[in-house]
Image (spheres, rainbow, N blue to C red):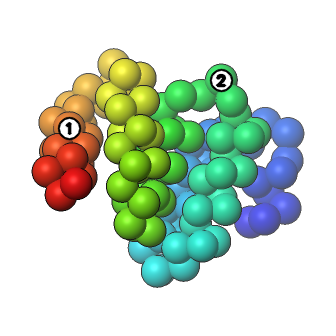
Amino acid sequence: MQRAMHLPGTDAYSVYAYGMGLLRKEKKDKAMSTFIFNQQQHPQDKFWTSLGLARGYTALGDKEKAIANWEVVLQNVPANLSNRTAAYQAALKKLKDAS
C-alpha cells in the first residue's frame, strides 16, 4: 500500500481510507504519517485531507490541531456528504467542550 499511495493518480479519498484503516488498528503514528502525506500530495483537497488530520489529531489528543482541522472539514463538506455534517459538528463540539 505504501507504494500504491505514491502512484500518480492515487486520489485523496483512497489515502484517507488507508489511514483510517491504520487508525482503527490503533496504529496512530502510521495513520498520522499517512494523513500528513495525503495533505502534502493533495494540497488542493480541503475535505479528505483535513478529515484525516482531524481524526488523527483527535486520536492523538492534540485538541488544538484537531479543532483547526475539523473547522476546515466543516467549511469544505461536499454536497454528496452533507448528511454527515451533523456528525462532524458533534466531533468538533466535543473537542471544544473538553478544552
Task: Give the secondary structure at mark 2.
Answer: loop
**Taking the image as drawn, is residue 64 in sight?**
yes
- Which residue does the image show at 73% across and 40% down from the upper left? 40
Q: Earlier in the sequence, mark 1 or mark 2?
A: 2
Q: Which mark is residue 42?
A: none
Tell me the crowding category of disc 1: few under 14, some 14 to 19, or many 20 or more residues within 10 angstroms, Cα based: some
In terms of depth relative to the viewer, which is nearer, 34 or 79? Answer: 34
27 left or right of 41 in image = left
Q: Quadrant of residue 4?
A: bottom right
Residue 17 place in picture, x, y as percent: 53, 55
In terms of depth relative to the viewer, which is nearer, 63 or 79? Answer: 63
- Which residue does the image show at 22% across and 54% down from the upper left? 99
In terms of depth relative to the viewer, which is nearer, 66 or 89? Answer: 66
Residue 28 place in picture, x, y as percent: 52, 73
Tell me the crowding category of disc 2: few under 14, some 14 to 19, or many 20 or more residues within 10 angstroms, Cα based: few
Q: Quadrant of residue 30?
A: bottom right
Q: CA distance from mark 1 to mark 2?
A: 22 Å
Amino acid identity at mark 2: Gln
Amino acid identity at mark 1: Gln
- Which residue does the image show at 38% across and 66% down from the upper left? 61
* Residue furthest to the bottom: 26
35 left or right of 59 in image = right
8 left or right of 95 in image = right
Q: How many marks?
A: 2
Task: Give the secondary structure at mark 1.
Answer: helix
- Which residue does the image show at 44% across and 68% down from the upper left? 60
Q: Which residue is mark 2?
A: 44
Q: Which residue is mark 1?
A: 89
Residue 93 place in picture, x, y as percent: 17, 44
